Amino acid sequence: MRAGHAAAAALVLAAALLAAPPAWLPAQPPARPVSEQAVHDIAAQLRCVVCQNLSVADSPSEMANQMRAIVRERLQAGESPAEVVQYFVDRYGEWILLSPRRRGFNWLVWLGPVVAVAAGLAIVAVLLWRWTRRARREAASPAAPSVDATMSERIRREMEAEP
Amino acid sequence: MIPEVGGGAAFAALALAVWGAVAAAVGGRTGRVALVESAQHAALAVFVLVTACFALLTYAFLAFDFSVRYVATNTNLGTPFYYRITGVWGALEGSIILWTWMLALFTLLVILRHRESARELYPWVLTVMLAVIGFFLLVMTVAAPPFERLTPAPANGRGLNPLLEDTGMITHPVALYLGFTGLTVPFAFALAALIAGRVGDAWITMTRRWTIVAWYFLSLGLLIGGWWSYHVLGWGGYWAWDPVENAAFMPWLTATAFLHSVMIQERRRMLKLWNIALVILTFGLTLFGTFLTRSGVIASVHAFTQGTIGILFLSFLAVVLLTALGLLAWRWDALRAQGELDSIVSRESAFLLNNVLLVAATFTVFFGTVFPLLSEAARGVKVSVGAPFFNQVNVPLFLSLVFLMGVGPLIAWRRASPDNLRRNFVLPVAAGVLAAAAFFTLGVRSALALLALALTVFVAGTIAVDVVRATRARLRMGERVLPALGGLLLRHNRRYGGFVVHLGILIITLGVTGSHAWSVQTETTLRRGEAAELAGYRVRFDGLTATEESNHFKVAGTFTVSNGRVVGVLRPAKKFYPQEQSPIAYVDYRLGLKEDVYLVLGDFARDGSQATVKVQVNRLVSWIWIGGLVLTLGTLLAILPERKKAA
């Protein structure tokens, strides 16, 4: 057990030393003021590369911390948000974006849900139309419908029901 | 010796489950009661054997038997007693045992409850339940043997994943698995109905409570998962649209759709086919979720071929779906029925729309979750589909569902007259519009938040209108207010249980809306004695402390939080585990109805002179957990035995 704790202590030390420098060096005088909100908005689109499935904005990890710092620096240097995002895409690939860009193959994932909703609504609309046909017909001719009309309607329905 | 007994028990259970499934099927086909009884005994024996496996594995954990690979990977000498027990289901092998055990338990309960009542369906229900158990026992014996030996046995184990050292680890998986396995019961009844050719309403009436209970445990599991994520993972959120979360969410969505669409069948004898399809889909999604999360396929398309588990699950899923489709085709004529509606403006329509939206949301979650695999396979390019995508696509669907939640329960069956619409909806709509206006004047500018709030108030309004009207009717009969209200809830417990569940969902919606729209955060480095300010709070850094725990080393910061008066002293920490490369964040927080103060410790100077801290003020998050409690009450009310209506 001793050995385990010594190892743990060594780890703490190593982690502390590694983590130490960037966080409290006096910050460079910013080239231009950058709001934390702007940093957050960009970080929220980026995937933290060491995490399960968290954005750079949310992740408490050291890596995400450094990535947020890069976002801040680049914004301060005058890059546009799109350029900052592109910088990460160039380095890590499209995978870094938590929301796939709307282009090419990726349109599939964006249009899939729209198609699903549209198809579902269309099916329900058709079903409702068919199921209410009799009610509509009765409403249209409130007087007692003639036997012939009822009969022909029934025949028609039964014929439709056959495949 | 003990591991070999455990392994043997699993094999024996597998053999008995297969026998039971076959015996029940032959018994059902030929009407030989003795065979069905034999299947019952087999089910009981399976339960005993799986319980033994579970107990033996637990014993191996408690006794630090590192000669068992699973024990050596998931515990070490420093693991506290409590987490040695929860560690049993902390990884794949043990969670398969837990899953199987619950399936066996549900099978016993089904036997006890439906032995007499489900006459023609009963043997087939047994067959399906035992076949599913058989599959999981196959996984347990072939693909993920929990009792596999490790030679030479190490002196110490690797240790449990530190993130799992939390009380949520006992409740979260247990609730979730109760939900998943519970959904096997309606699935078994649906298949039995198809096989026996009794596709009427009997199976739906018999499984109503089972489905509600399973749905409830699934909801509870998801909520506890959210709570675990919120207070363990340290990112200040409760839902990340992670594939693992999505895997559990999809069956929840389809089960919710099912709970609503069965009402149309009970009432109007329509949608027989659709209801059976929904149950099959729901069960298929629980299998798919397990495949997704346990096969490694999420990491990469190519990962899942490495183990047998992914292939097993995928094959079983294929067998289940093909069998189900075959049965549906076989019973096509009995299932097909021409629907008949009086008007498009009716409760039936509202429920159909509800189903469209829920299934579309399921598809969205499904497609988004598997799209990275699709992209990798088709283009060779890895993409991510994460929270921004899912939020953007699903929020409109969910808000529409909230709207329907207000319409559905009050609009008339068959045909809603203008008078019915006026009586039920004028006041709630007005309340919703007024609420939106009020929040706008109070300074809420986010259109999404305004819409969500207006809809929430509208739905709450519809519930209020209904309760007030029904109570008034009872007051006119001479009852007093409280007895009238209580009588209402108990006499019509299904309806009002549903309302209370809706209320719970509304409260959760409020919490989700609030936390998205109004939470704020900041991250700063503080010297000792310095304070950060956020949203009226002062967070002062008072120093660091380091402590040795049984299996890790913990560095905690001390922060005094005040807003005029002292709110409390918070101690967020980092925990250093020897088996983990990077430290684990340990957040500290003060929960409140209006907002939570939530601190995450970042870097720190070793001498304790300064530390980086992330301060979050998360708005209304507590209402999500409160909503969970309300949901619990509603479910309890809904499953109470229905009272005979007295005159």
Image: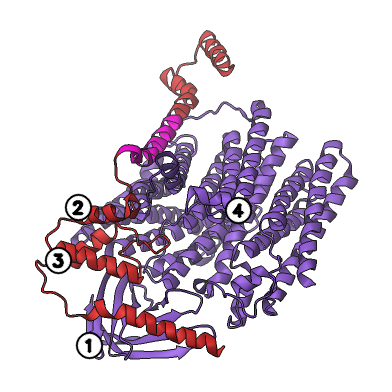
* Type of amino acid under label 1: Glu
* Type of amino acid under label 4: Gly
Q: What shade does chain B have? A: purple
Label 2 close to label 4 by CB (< 8 Å): no
Label 4 close to label 3 by CB (< 8 Å): no
Question: Which residues fall within the magenta stretch?
Answer: A104-125
The lab-note entry on whether marks 3 and 2 share a chain reads yes
Q: Secondary structure at mark 3?
A: loop
Q: Secondary structure at mark 2?
A: helix
Residue B387 pos. (x, y %): 36, 55
For the question of whether residue B529 can be seen, the reply is: yes
Residue A82 shows which numbered tag?
2
Q: Which quadrant of the figure contains the N terminus of chain B?
A: bottom right
* Type of amino acid under label 2: Ala
Residue B466 pos. (x, y %): 44, 53
* Type of amino acid under label 3: Val
Q: Secondary structure at mark 1?
A: loop
**CA gap, disc 2 to disc 4?**
41 Å
Label 1 close to label 2 by CB (< 8 Å): no
The lab-note entry on whether marks 1 and 3 share a chain reads no
Outermost residue toward the top in this view:
A148
Q: Nearer the viewer, mark 4 or mark 3?
A: 4
Colour pattern of the rendering: by chain
Q: Name the residue tied to disc 4.
A: B307
Q: What shade does chain A have? A: red
Q: Name the residue tied to disc 3.
A: A34
Residue B530 shows which numbered tag?
1
